[in-house]
Image (cartoon, rainbow, N blue to C red):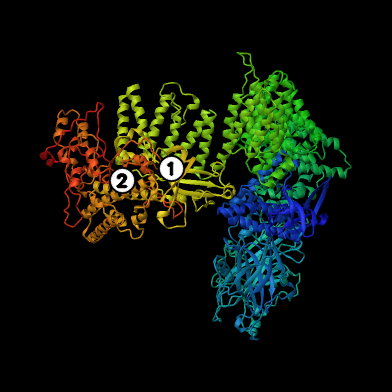
Amino acid sequence: MWQKTDRSQKYGVAVYNYSSRLPHRLTLNIGDTVQISEELDGWFYGCKTKNKNECGIFPKSYIHVREAVVAKFGSLERVTSTESPIAQEISTVLREWHTIWKQFYLDQNEELENIQVMMLELMDWRKKIMSRKLTNEEVKDLQQRVSSRIDFGNAMLGLDLVVRDEQGNILNPDNTSVVELYKQHETASDRIRLEQNTVTGVRDTSITGPQTFNLFVQLRNFVCRIGEDADILMSLYDAKFSKFISENYIVNWGKDGVPKDIEMLNNFRVVFTDLGSRDRTRERVYLVFQIIRIGVMDPKDVEDKKQTRRLRRPFGVAAIDITEYLNGLKNDAEEDKQIFIPFQSCGEKEFMDSLIKKVVVAKEINHKGQGLWVSLKVLQGDVKQVKEDYPHLVGPNTCVSRKLGFPDVIMPGKGGDVRNDIYVTIKGGEFTRGPAKTADKNVEVTMVVCNNKGEVLKDVISYGCGGDMMSEYKSLIYYHEDKPKWQETVKVAISTEEEFKGLHLKFTFKHRSTSETKDRSERPFAMAFIKLMNKNSTTLSDTDHNLLVYKDHNSPDLKSSKKMKITEKKEDRDKFSPYLDLPSTREIFNEQNIQPTGKVTLFSGPFTLSAKDSFVISSFVCSTKLTHNVVLLGLLQWQDIMTDTTKLRDHLEKLMKVDGEEIVKFLQDLLDSLFSILMQNTISDVYDNLVFDALVHIISLISDRKYHQFRPVLDAYVESSFSFAMAYQKLMIILRDYVDKAMETNQKILKSAMKSLEYLFKFIVQSRNHFARLNDGRGKQSFELQLKQLIKSISNMMLYTSDNTLVAQGSALKYMCATIPDILKVFDAVELSHLMVEFINNVPKERLTKQKLKCIDDLVHSKLFVLPECRLILLPMMLQHTRVLMEQKEEIEDCIEVLSNILNLTFSRDMDKYEEDISLITKMSLRTVIQACINLDKTSKEAIKCVCVLLSMLRQMKELHFSQYMDMEEFVFLIDLRDFLMEILMLFLDLVSNNVFPPDWMEMIMLENSIILRALQIFAKVIHDRFTQEFERELWGFFFKCSISFLTQKSLQLEHFTSSKRSKIVCRYRDMRREAGFEIRQMWFHLGVNKIQFIPDMVGAVLEMTLIPEIELRKATIPIFFDMMVCEFMQIEPSTRKIKGNFNQVEHELIMCLDALVEGGQGDGEYKDLICDILYKLCSNHSTLKEQGLRFVNTIKELLQHLLEYRKIIQSEVKELRMSCIVNLLNFYHDIGRQEMYIRYLYKLCDLHMKCDNYTEAANTLKLHVGLLKWTDDGLDPMLQSGWYPAARTHRELKEYLYYDIISYFDKGKMWEKGIELTKELVHLYEEELYDYERLSVILKRQAELFACIIRELRPDPEYFRVGYYGRGFPSFLQNKVFIYRGKEYERLTDFNSRMQTLFPNAELLKSLSPPSSEVKESDKQYLQINAVTPVLELQDRFLNKCVNEKILKYYSVNEVQKFTFSRRIDESGADISQMWLERTYLTTLYSFPGILCWFPVNHTDMRKVSPLENAIETLETTNKRINSLIEQHIADDHLSTNNLGMLLNGVVDASVNGGISNYKVFYSEGYGESEIQLHLVHKLKDITKNQVMLLKEALLIHRRKVSEELRPFHDHMEQRFKEMVKLIHKEYRLNVSQVPDSFATLKRIKSQSCVPISRVSEVLNNPNNPQNLSDSSAAPSPSLKTSHSTRAPSVYIKPDKSAPTTPIRPNTISRMNPFKRTSVASLANTSDHSSEGGGSNRNSLEAPIELSEQLTPRRPLRSDEQRRLSRPNSFQLMPPIMNSTSNSSLVSNTSSTAENSDFELGDEMPTPPLPEKTAYSDYSNVEITPSPSHHRANSGNRKSKPVPPLPTELNGTPPPVPKKYTSKQASLT
């Protein structure tokens, strides 16, 4: 039994995919989260959290249960995960991205890999977050990175922008003002754009990371074989300038390959600190490791105990580029990720500095596995912050390596950056070898710090952090190098308490011997020194110093100063440090102009200058106590020069020119000195203004952007270090004096004073507070009065209009508000507010407008604005200024910024808190802001901000505010209120139609919509209350238009969103469309009698609203249509005063709009059912409207059905289906009489045909439009107009245009007959109606071209195919229906099958022509049944009793057809053809072909059986036709190859495979045939057999005449087989074929055609003025016609067929076959139907065994030869005697000659007959005027013989006269 789950099993995640077709199962995908309600055994019951409508059971084993928080709301439970918000967000994002990623994979999108990488990163980060092993700071940092990556990915995928707060949490719009939300959107967009630019390689250098950061480095291991102890020096290196930028970090490594202190293994940590923004911009920064070996000189001698030990020797370098880590381009540096850095050893003569330069530029290093393993991580903030945020990384034992220089900010005080360091770099030297040396020295430099007594200071030298402080430093030793380059930097850290004067650096140079014995005897051979303080008491300058090297001649006797006893006596000092009086550097030496010579050297005591030796160092002072500047030094030591007024004044004046970097380093001491001078009573009067100017200069310097990072330093000084209690009085007096005398004061000084107002007031207030604490608050009133007077003086200064004070006034406006926080400490806020209002109002109009607005904006952000009582004073002034400027369209951007900040600061969820403020803002600014929004360009940033201001106002307004606003005096008259409502509705309409926010700002757009919806609801009530009696149609209409546009906007269509996005919107804002729809419905029914004014204008808008797929909205709004119908139906006609009685306008508009909207993608099947159900019920219950209403509902239902089908298909690439849907709509609109819609879809269909090159169908489609037009000049109705010819204004004009298009399309489709029909109409128009002979001549030429094309051009016959669509898988208009398709040119059955299977790739092809079962028809699958069909010719009456060219008739055999047939075998088992019965099916289509489609449905089917005998007759007839066709082709073209003829003849006379006529042997037997019909069919079969023998004879004669010598044996074989065949027929079948006439004259060809040669016609047309043309033409035929017979097509005589029966008839009605005719006497309509059904057919159905045959048609029994001769008239009645030629190839043969040669047999002695001579009675009607070789070949391929025509008779029964005949002489001339 199912049981409720406990709290521990309420939430789970699917870990496997689960799918089942069984009922009540819930389908799950990996990652789906479920809320579990019940459990039973191994099953859970629950729902998906993303869609709680999906419920069901699922296996427990597929679910991983997680902890969750269960919150109950009554009977409902809300289950949420206990994961952190960021982990939940990652999960949601991964699910959403995964769906897109899969689609990218299917589409092979180029972003696939990028998305995959980001998804893997998010999964990895989520794993870290869920591990709960990160510190708070690491979680915060990771959260920022996760947020950045999610935002970047969403932007890449086109998803919505996620807005976050500073901590990276998603912002809640409910708790955020509109202005703030907009700013956060902008910030997020900028951040994403920056990241995109970074990814694409475009860096935005204007945006940098945090100002101060640090680099954490942990040395994991050092893999290298040294064999001795070593020091590893780690430091940062600038590769561009080749210098170190940080102190060294020292690691002592043991000779065993492990640290000396084994406990430090994997725990060497250092933080390189003080890094700032300038370090981010360095081009190339490296982390460099210098390995220094400490041991013997040569590592090969390490085992030699006599070698000198503890020598510092270079060993190698390792380096890694960390530039991208520092500037943030790489963020994969983590403390747990190890990075390998390859090691490069040092060469024998290679300096360490040279090796570093080589390593940093090397692309690859052959490290051989040697190197260091380190971890890196960039830490943000200063050292103090880092220690707090990363205690697990930066602990007490973590070393700190400082930068060689100050950080960006130098903090004062005890806890600040108090430093007194000098960095000394030993660069290099040059030393002479000496007379006793044979090799260069191994020079070692020892550096010590000594005082003026020569004492060495203890522990003041540092080689780097991690090492102990030293008293002396020893350099590296380069073996046998007299010009060593050390480039070693050490730090000299001297206590500030130490007497600095006299301190100096002393360098001694010593040669180090490899032998320890010799090395002990070595003494320093030279020394150098440099003093740390110059003579003017300034510190050593930061530059290179070229030191003088002094030789020590008494070095063996010189004792170490460390072992000497130091005394204070002057003579001792002179004895032990005699060198201090010597010049220390080359620069001093040159300044003293000392010229030592060879005889006189510079010496003192034992030290003598060595002119050839040199030694170079560089120094860099990093001290807050020592300076290089004399002016600063003088001011810092002002007491020493207090009596020297000139010098003090000079220092104060020169302070303005001192470099700012020097000033900020000594900021605290310098300020103390200035205030001390100011407060000295003895000299203050003299120096007050100078000190004030210097103070102002320093404050101004800090205010500059360059030094803005020192503001905290100055703030810290004011708060902590400033202690001058009486300074405020002097500062106030001096400042007021400057302001009062603004016109006379130096404007530069005045500007600086105004610029320094903030800190001047800080000093004043802080000084006053010190004084008050010391004196118990004495003098408060006096101070306040002075302060008030000072502020008023500044305020009065703003009244000046002179340009002289403009800059100072601008500075005052800029900095005055910064003084407010400090003034409020000692002054009343309300009174200060009045003073600030006066200050701003004093600024003259149109002067400093921008600065004034900036000052107002600063005032908004001040503490005064926070106080309610102050806001009421300040707001009117602020709003007045902004309103005036906005109305004048000045400084719009700044005004909007001020208003936005005001509204941002007055936003609160508690709306009562700022109720009075909002009321004031609304009254003074709402209308102004609305008008600004209307006027501004919506694409500008100002317009977007202005919209935000408006939305913020409307959001913060309560209904009371709306009511108060619209009750103001401004709206006393309704017209004013109407204008206001129209303005804001117009703006709303613009905003919802063209949103100003980017489409991915979902939160912003939804908040905007919620605000607009609330305003619309309030305005709806106002419109109803105030504008119903005095009805304002325009206002009501605008409300409806705006509301419906709001409801239908794209951003509210929730069904287009993902489920997560949809649920998020609905949870926060609900479905706003429903609320808007209900409001519209309510307002509609409030219209009352005024509804008719909105009919039918509102039908389309309401329809668009009802089409929204929200069920409740549809139910609420669909009844509006019925209400509209009733309103129009019951409307009183003004003329008749009767009700209208119809709703035609509503019906028309609804149909028009439905067509457009449903085609555009709106609406669905559910909507169709719902609207029909609702309207059906409403109409059924209305007695008057019922009949029309129900009819209208049925129309709507059918229309929606067609439109939905069309929309579904239109998205498909199958154009044929789209055409079918269009035709369905065409028929529908035609049936209901909607001409405009009918024509619209006509042109859609035509365009589709044109894209498919279906020119014939396109022409037929246009004919439907033409059919609606008349040949009149009547004006064209709008519904009949064509978009192709918008200029056409009359019926005739448009019809004429379209006719030319149709003719052109028919020409392209090779349907020239159709084009001729249209040209005839145009000929009649131009000749009989318009008398436009010019156009008549053109159209006649065009007509002539079309006639010529029929004869000349090759026109392939289209094939027709039957297609059955079975199964419910097809569209509804195809399901279980059969269609006939017209194939494309040269398209055969296999090609058509491939095309159909391409269109329907999922369809299965049925292999049988049997009717499909009901199971197949009802299946959900798709089945296709395809086979070829033959069109049934229905010949036109105009061709009866005429000799018609075969090419003309050929057109009608495959065109203008509506009936088709095909056959299939009934019994598949037997192979005996004589027993094979066929089932013949006749199909009739709905329309004839060709039409407006390439396919039409079958509307009637008829079937009958075909007996084996009938099948035999059809088969033989088909063979005869093929032989006859080839004979005609060879007669027409004497050069035609005999290959096809030979193959056909061989297949007939030597039918060894198929059996030939022997298959039908049974039918020739005497006893076959029981019924009279069968007997006559047998007789017909025998006649056809005889006819075939005659055809074979003539064909063999042609073949013998044309065959090549190589194929002569083949021909002889066929003749032999033919003779055997004739004998077989005579003997076996008892057919007397010997009576068949010989083939010299086997066919009588008669043509009833013009007697005038076509050449003569052309000649007459070309020379119309020659009177001799006609007479000449009869005398001599044109020589050009000698070979014209080769280009003529055969003509066919058509005998009238009145009955055309389809079943066998009685014998007396069956004609006897004439054996001398190659074509049947019966109508071509009865024979051509089955021309391709016999054994030689090229059409095949799907089943191979099926053999399609020709339909049996009745014919008369054959007559005897005697009867034929008696019935035939004499030949001279038809032709001249010359026609009695015996030529085999003659087109006309005499029957008498045939009889004379009846006994002729084929033989080799038969001579080749000559070509016939031309006569005037030859058939020239089909000859081309200018025959070409291509036409010659093409037109000879389809030639057929014609039957003998009956004698022509006149009406009176008299035969026509005999035509004039040629003489033999004339004939010979041809």
**Residue 1443: percent from left, percent from top:** 28, 37
Query: Label 1 to label 2, Cα distance in Å?
Result: 22 Å
Q: Nearer the viewer, residue 345 or 1728?
A: 1728
Front residue (pair 845, 887): 887
Would you place residue 690 above or below residue 387 in this image?
Answer: above
Crowding at dot 2, Cα within 10 Å, few <14 / some 14-19 / many 20+, comes out as some
> Which mark sits nearer the N-terminus, 1 or 2?
1
Q: Of circles 1 and 2, which is in front?
A: 1
- Position in image of residue 977 (x %, y %): 70, 22
Quadrant occupied by the C terminus:
top left
In the picture of the structure, the residue carrying the numbered disc 1 is: 1460
Q: Residue at x 67, y 70 (%)?
A: 578
Report whether residue 1388 is seen. yes
Q: Nearer the viewer, residue 266 or 1560?
A: 1560
Label 1 environment density (alpha carbons within 10 Å; few <14, some 14–19, many ≥20): many
On the image, the x and y values in percent for residue 1729 come to 38, 43
Give the x, y percent position of residue 1568: 37, 52
Check residue 1399 in the rendering and tell me which mark sits there, or answer none.
none
Q: How many numbered dots are placed on residues in this image?
A: 2
Confirm whether residue 845 shows in the render.
Answer: no
Which of the 4 image quarters holds residue 393? Answer: bottom right
* Mark 2: secondary structure: loop
The amino acid type, in three-letter code, at marker 1 is: Phe
* Residue named by callout 2: 1838
Most distant residue in the left direction: 1865
**Residue positioned 37% across, 31% down in the render:** 1318
- The residue most toward the right is 776
